[in-house]
Image: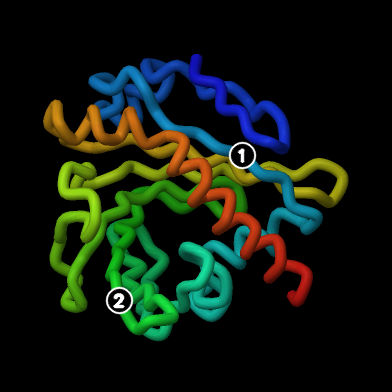
Amino acid sequence: MVMMKSTQGEFPPLPPSDESAPFFPERRRHSREFAIARTFKAPRELVFAAWTEQQHLKQWFGPKGFTIPISHLNLVPNGAFHYCLRAANGVEMWGKWIFREIVPPERIVFVNTFSNRHGNLTRHPYVPNWPLEMLTTSTFSEDNGKTTIYLQWSPLHANAAEQRTFDTMHEAMAQGWTGTFDQLDDYLITF
């Protein structure tokens, strides 16, 4: 089991990869996944809406200091969220999610990639050996009006170099997701 730690404490353990293998056979090959959890002071339906409605995603998703000036969302299996992340200096990065499973308000499963403005798959703009595709599973659970998001990330169809890069970047991923979750936390207060 993989256990993530942060300054906010220990996160729940990641289930062994073989537990999810019947649903996602490509996970069988990966001994290490990245996982992070965060609890928000908001009901699950609201947090799920923030993850699944374009007007909300544009307000909080992405690294700190970036905006989403362009996005298109089709929230159905095999649909996509295609978006542009723009830094304060005008530099743009494009990304795309292809939805595999949507279970409101419990879970979203999608393949996450970098893309170009036309939605075609591209390499990470700064990390050339980053896996081309990442399987993302976000689970939402509620307890006493608070919602915990449990996010799992694993490379799909990664070669050995891509897997090594992924395995060595868990700390950076935790920092990135913590910043993104901070923005979601701030946004949920305005809802």
Q: Amino acid at mark 1?
A: Ala
Q: Which of disc 2 and disc 1 is earlier in sequence? A: 1
Which label lies toward us, 1 or 2?
A: 2
How many residues crowd around disc 2 within 10 Å: few (fewer than 14), some, or many (20 or more)?
some
Q: Is residue 112 above or below residue 75?
A: above
Give the Cα distance between marks 1 and 2: 28 Å
Residue depicted at x 23% and y 28%: 164
What percent of the width, then of the height, locates residue 65? 51, 72
Q: Secondary structure at mark 2?
A: strand
* x and y, in percent, of residue 155 in the image: 27, 37
- Which quadrant is the C terminus positioned in? bottom right
Residue beneath label 2, please? 92
Pick whichever, 124 or 12, lies toward us: 124
Residue 187 or 76: which is nearer the viewer? 187
Residue 66 locus on image (x, y percent): 46, 73
Q: Residues within 10 Å of mark 1 (few under 14, many from 20)?
A: many
Q: Residue at x 15, y 60 (%)?
A: 122
Which amino acid does the dot numbered 2 rest on?
Glu
Tag 1 residue:
37
Closer-to-camera residue (179/184):
179
Q: Would you place residue 99 above or below residue 161 in this image?
A: below
Q: Residue at x 49, y 19 (%)?
A: 2
Q: Quadrant of residue 96?
A: bottom left
In the image, taking residue 148 as reference, residue 13 lies left or right, namely left
